Amino acid sequence: MALEIGAEILVGGMQARAPRRSGRLIKTIRKTKVFNDHRRHRLTIRAIVTSPYALYQEYGSSRNPPHPFVRPTQRIDGPIAVHIVGELLRR
């Protein structure tokens, strides 16, 4: 499905940019199931990070500087994923 491919692009981008100190953060980056909202005629899939300390990695804390990995992925890989999903849906 096209949405799954788009989510995989975002997951891969976040995993590539995430800090690799222990590898635990990378293991928590995944995609969700496809949600079908029949009332609004929408399909939704998300790339999510379930680690409780991902927020501190992204924005930093009083003791650690930020190491953003979600925002750069949205900025760089987001438009690519949207383009690819659009092309796949046009076929």
Image (cartoon, grey):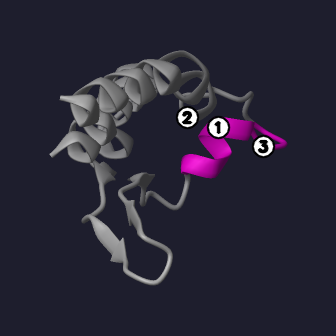
The one nearer the camera, 66 or 34, is: 34
The numbered disc on residue 77 is: none
The crowd level at tag 3 (other Cα within 10 Å; few <14, some 14-19, many 20+) is: few
Q: Amino acid at mark 1?
A: Glu
Q: Which residues are magenta?
A: 54-63
Label 2: which residue? Answer: 70
Asked if the residue at tag 2 contacts the one at tag 1, i.e. Cβ–Cβ closer than 8 Å, the answer is yes
Residue matched to label 3: 61
CB of mark 3 within 8 Å of CB of mark 1?
A: no
Residue 60 within the segment the image draws in magenta: yes
Left or right, 35 with respect to 77, comes to: left
Q: Is 27 or 38 nearer to us in this picture? A: 38
**Magenta span dominant secondary structure:** helix
Residue drawn at the location 38% of the way across and 44% of the way down: 25
Where, quadrant-wise, is the C terminus in this rendering? top left
Up/down of 68 relative to 30, above or below: above
Determine the CA span between mark 1 and mark 2.
Answer: 7 Å
- Front label number (3 vs 2): 2
Is residue 59 shown above or below 73?
A: below
- Three-letter amino acid code of the residue under disc 3: Ser
Report which quarter residue 33 is drawn in.
bottom left
What residue is shown at x 71% (from left), y 29% (from top)? Answer: 66
Is residue 6 placed above or below 49 in the rendered structure?
Answer: above
Q: Amino acid at mark 2?
A: Val
